[in-house]
Image: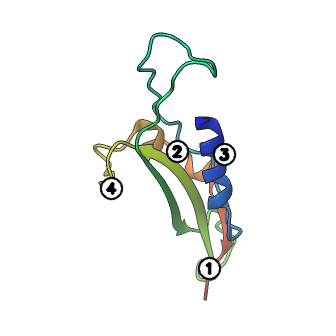
């Protein structure tokens, strides 16, 4: 069920069309030692976040005024407080911007 939830959130992050990168892998917890009828009970952190980030164009040949790099990321966290560099999950801090982001025309 959690995998379905994650796929649904990624699909919604792609509307309107924008580049959605892979989610930062959520920390999954297994509070029960026994599996139920659908498998082990798995709990995701309570808050699902979708963020779209922009930076300068990745391709230096592109017009720096007309193009920006962009990446939409899905991640889960325990509280609604925005993460900072020191307390963000490693999967979120260590995203490969150059490998995942895409250049797109900047919105006018």
Spatial separation of the CA atoms under disc 2 and disc 1: 22 Å
Q: How crowded is mark 2: few (under 14 residues within 10 Å), some or many (20 or more)?
A: some
N-terminal of the pair, mark 2 or mark 4, is 4
Q: Mark 1 points at which residue?
A: 106
Q: Quadrant of the N terminus?
A: top right
Label 1 element class: loop
Q: Which label sits in the foreground, 4 or 3?
A: 3
Tell me, for residue 95, which label it has, or none: 2
Above or below 29: residue 95: below
Tell me, for residue 7, which label it has, or none: 3
Above or below 62: residue 27: above
Residue plotted at (31% across, 52% down): 84
Q: Specify whether 9 is left or right of 17.
A: left
N-terminal of the pair, mark 4 or mark 1, is 4
Spatial separation of the CA atoms under disc 4 and disc 3: 22 Å
Q: Mark 4 points at which residue?
A: 82
Residue plotted at (41% across, 39% down): 45
Above or below 87: residue 72: below
């Amino acid at each position: 069920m959690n995998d379905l939830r994650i796929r649904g959130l990624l699909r919604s992050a792609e509307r309107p069309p924008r580049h959605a990168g892979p989610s930062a892998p959520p920390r999954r917890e297994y509070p029960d030692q026994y599996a139920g009828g659908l498998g082990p009970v798995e709990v995701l952190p309570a808050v699902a976040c979708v963020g779209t980030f922009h930076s300068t164009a990745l391709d230096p040949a592109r017009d720096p005024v007309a193009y920006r790099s962009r990446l939409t990321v899905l991640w889960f966290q325990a509280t609604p407080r925005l993460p900072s560099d020191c307390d963000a999950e490693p999967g979120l801090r260590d995203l490969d911007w150059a490998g995942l982001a895409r250049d797109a025309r900047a919105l006018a």
